[in-house]
Image (cartoon, rainbow, N blue to C red):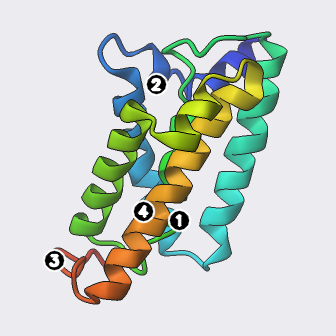
């Protein structure tokens, strides 16, 4: 059960005393940005691993509600949000972070419905949906305004 708690809490990030979901989303930006520099499928594989690992960990712990210390869903959702970026830039990372957190807190439409579901699927699904919607918004912004995220581009090496 210690491994399940480690996974579910995002490496114990979920146990920070203030705003663990927001802290987890911020922490997730670092490995997410690093994954964006790798081949395109690297971030997708990380998202899949976080989703499956999180689902299994939450199930193993028999968590039915969504306690604040379970933040693996924030990692998966924040990484999903980064899929809308074409390159790593401070402007893009911050935009994906802010939109994802707003959707995760406000929980409009399908996000709210998923949040009301019990068990591991409900815990994971609301953040995955919020991340997917964020990725779509970020992609649409990039499509409409191609240079919108060019401020403070961060290159590997």
Residue 156 seen in render:
no
Residue at 73 percent across and 53 percent down: it is 48
Q: Give the numbered dot on residue 35.
A: 1
Looking at the image, tell me whether mark 2 or mark 4 is earlier in sequence order.
2
The location of residue 99, given as percent across then percent down, is 33, 51
- On the image, the x and y values in percent for residue 75 come to 53, 41
Q: Earlier in the sequence, mark 3 or mark 1?
A: 1
Instruction: Tell me the quarter of the image containing the C terminus.
Output: bottom left
Q: Choose the circle earlier in sequence order: 2 or 3.
A: 2
Between marks 2 and 3 in the image, the one whose residue lies nearer the viewer = 3
- Looking at this rendering, what residue extends furthest in the bottom direction? 146
Q: Nearer the viewer, mark 3 or mark 4?
A: 3
Give the class, few, some or many, for how many residues have Cα within 10 Å of label 3's Cα (few <14, many ≥20).
few
Q: Secondary structure at mark 3?
A: loop
Spatial CA distance of label 1 from label 2 is 19 Å
Q: Mark 4 and 1 residues: CB-CB less than 8 Å, in contact?
A: yes
Left/right placement of residue 55 relative to residue 107 reads right
């Amino acid at each position: 059960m210690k491994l399940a708690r480690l996974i579910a809490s995002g490496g114990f990030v979920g146990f920070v005393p203030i705003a663990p979901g927001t802290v987890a989303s911020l922490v997730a930006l670092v490995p997410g940005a690093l994954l964006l520099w790798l081949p395109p499928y690297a971030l997708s594989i990380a998202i899949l691993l976080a989703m499956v690992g999180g689902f299994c960990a939450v199930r193993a712990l028999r968590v039915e509600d969504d306690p604040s210390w379970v933040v693996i869903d924030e990692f998966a959702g924040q990484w999903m949000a980064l899929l809308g970026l074409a390159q790593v830039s401070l402007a893009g990372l911050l935009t994906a972070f802010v939109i994802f957190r707003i959707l995760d807190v406000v929980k409009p439409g399908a996000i709210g419905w998923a949040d009301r579901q019990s068990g591991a699927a409900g815990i994971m699904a609301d953040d995955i949906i919020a991340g997917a919607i964020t990725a779509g918004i970020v992609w649409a912004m990039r499509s409409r305004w191609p240079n919108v995220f060019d401020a403070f581009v961060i290159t590997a090496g």
